[in-house]
Amino acid sequence: MSIQNIEQRIFNSEDFKNFFTELVTPIIGVLIFLILWSFLAPKVVTSLGAIPGPKQVYSQFLALVDEHKNERHKETAFYKRQEIRNSKKLAKNPEAIIKTRKYAGNPTFFDQILTSIITVMAGFLLAAIIAIPIGIVAGLSKTVYAALNPLVQIFKPVSPLAWLPIVTMIVSATYVTSDDAWFDKSFLNSAITVLLCCLWPTIISTAVGVTNVTKDLQNVSHVLRLSWWTHVRKIVLPSAIPMIFTGLRLSLGIAWMVLIAAEMLSQNPGLGKFVWDEFQNGSSNSLGRIMVAVVVIGIIGFLLDQIMLFFQRKVSWDKTVSLR
Amino acid sequence: MNNIHLEITGVNMDFPTPNGPFRALEDVNLKVLKGEFVSIIGHSGCGKSTVLNIVAGLYQATAGGVILNGKEVIGPGPERAMVFQNHSLLPWLTAYENVELAVKTIFKGKKSKAEMKDWIEHNMKLVHMDHALHKRPDEISGGMKQRVGIARALAMEPEVLLLDEPFGALDALTRAHLQDSVMEIQADLGNTMMMVTHDVDEAVLLSDRIVMMTNGPAACVGETLHVDMPKPRDRIAVSEGKEYNNCRHEVLRFLYERHGKKVEVLETKEEGQKNDVVNFKQSKQINNKVA
């Protein structure tokens, strides 16, 4: 076989076509976007200067990384000083009362990212733990479904941000924090807001998944006289898993968007607060930093969805279904 | 052991519809002996499957009832295991696990783990599926799925095995294989079996008795026919015999001559016009053949 033949085979093969559509085309798309951005951005001049292009945004990203590193250095230095001070005190007088203080520096961009991720996951997981059982019961019992349906239908279209003031008031009235409490109030506010927006789609799709259990499988369950619990575990849950995951993925997507907005609105720590602070700050770097945040928010949202997709693939019994 | 095992007495079945109740069955009576193989045959929509579902306990008869071993049937249960038309295997479990679910549920506390495993494997061997124990339903053919469905039903150690058009969705060759398997199993285990079918040959080949149902609405048992052929039956040898063809003609005559024409008169009524026209045509063709 000549080299030419081999080359021809490589370039005509399905693999190559797949490689092209799956990797090269998306890269071209992104490149076109970047070119348009860097070309058009400088033409829009705002009170904070021209809109930054991709280059400036990237340099802001590097600046944020530096800031983060500096902050960490300061923090370790602070704890070191504290330790030395305390050990000196103890050396002088072994019975001296020593104080350990927490470092009170500003949270960096990366601290805010972590806060947001932890908050969204906490609210989302809590919502799943509450919503899936409710959805299963509602799907199994027409009575429960009829009772829940009007509530779900009315609360579902409400923006979770409308809940935010109520949640804030209730949390500050009922949750008394001390310095070493498990959660901050702000964390609870954001997490509960996320929970409220995840609840409804998950309940609805779980209930739909459960009602879609085929008559045949129900008959099998009847003939075997499966107990309620076994019926749920062996027949209902596996049948409903695809729909449950559809609901969960939908919820997580909404939750991430809502969380950022909630953080902006209520000044709770997180990426939303970072964006809002930069906006209020109004320095020449602000727009660039906000754009870094926008890109990071997008990437994290995408990764969260991919993680859900990964779990859906793991749990789903029907491997033939293409999951997108 | 010619004692009555299963008795259906005066069963009426009404289904609620927006235009008032629809009477599917009226005064269905049937006695099944222990170890007997009974087929129920009739035109589609006549309520054959409804009868089987009432015996299974999945439907509750509006009037009358079913007695099994001197006890009234209330609700479904494993002593009346059912083989469903479309196999009804749980798609997320392997063949083995599907049977295991039944075995674990029924023999909980009665069989040890090892005994259960043996019992599952024994039943899979009975339906010739011991080579594909750990395949999922979507990895095996339709016939194989139905074999697993039968294994699951057999594994329940049922007093009566109910088969609801078990081979209806299969191609002719696969169907023949499965019919042979069912005959083999009945010869081995001597279960009482009730099968719903619309295949005349299948009914004649497998049954001790064929129950022919009149057309709905308000269907009932029109006639019963004893198939007097020694078992085990070989499909080729039997099909050349006189008794086989007699039985076959008897059933066809009932289905198409009597109940094909009766429907013709009903044609002006609202229910199932299209079907009736088809029946009429078929009955003509068959009359010609018979003549």
Image (cartoon, coloured by chain):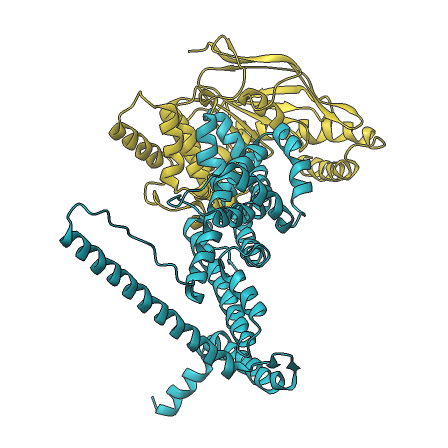
Residue B22 image position (x, y, % from top left): 74, 24
Please, is residue A77 above or below residue B287 in the view? below
Please, is residue B142 above or below residue A112 in the view? above
Quadrant location, the C terminus of chain B: top right
Residue A210 image position (x, y, % from top left): 55, 38
Is residue B272 in view from this perspective? yes
- Asked whether, in this view, residue A111 is left or right of residue A81, the answer is right
Q: In which quarter of the image is residue B187?
A: top left
Q: Nearer the viewer, residue A178 or A16?
A: A178
Q: Which residue is drawn at 45% across and 61% down?
A: A112
Is residue B233 in view from this perspective? no
Q: Which residue is drawn at 45% across and 15% down?
A: B34
Q: Which of A163 and A228 is in front in this view?
A: A163
Residue B138 image position (x, y, % from top left): 45, 48
Please, is residue B59 above or below residue A10 in the view? above
Q: Which residue is drawn at 35% across and 71% down?
A: A69
Please, is residue A246 above or below residue A62 in the view? above
Q: Residue at x 55, y 53 (%)?
A: A255
Outermost residue, front direction?
A: A92
- Across the whole image, how many numbered discs are drawn on residues? 0
Q: Nearer the viewer, residue A11 or A115?
A: A115
- Asked whether, in this view, residue A67 is left or right of residue A270, the answer is left
Q: In which quarter of the image is residue B155?
A: top left
Residue B109 image position (x, y, % from top left): 31, 21
| The chain coloured yellow in the image | B
- Asked whether, in this view, residue B108 is left or right of residue B192, the answer is left
Outermost residue, top direction?
A: B70
| The chain coloured cyan in the image | A
Quadrant location, the N terminus of chain B: top left
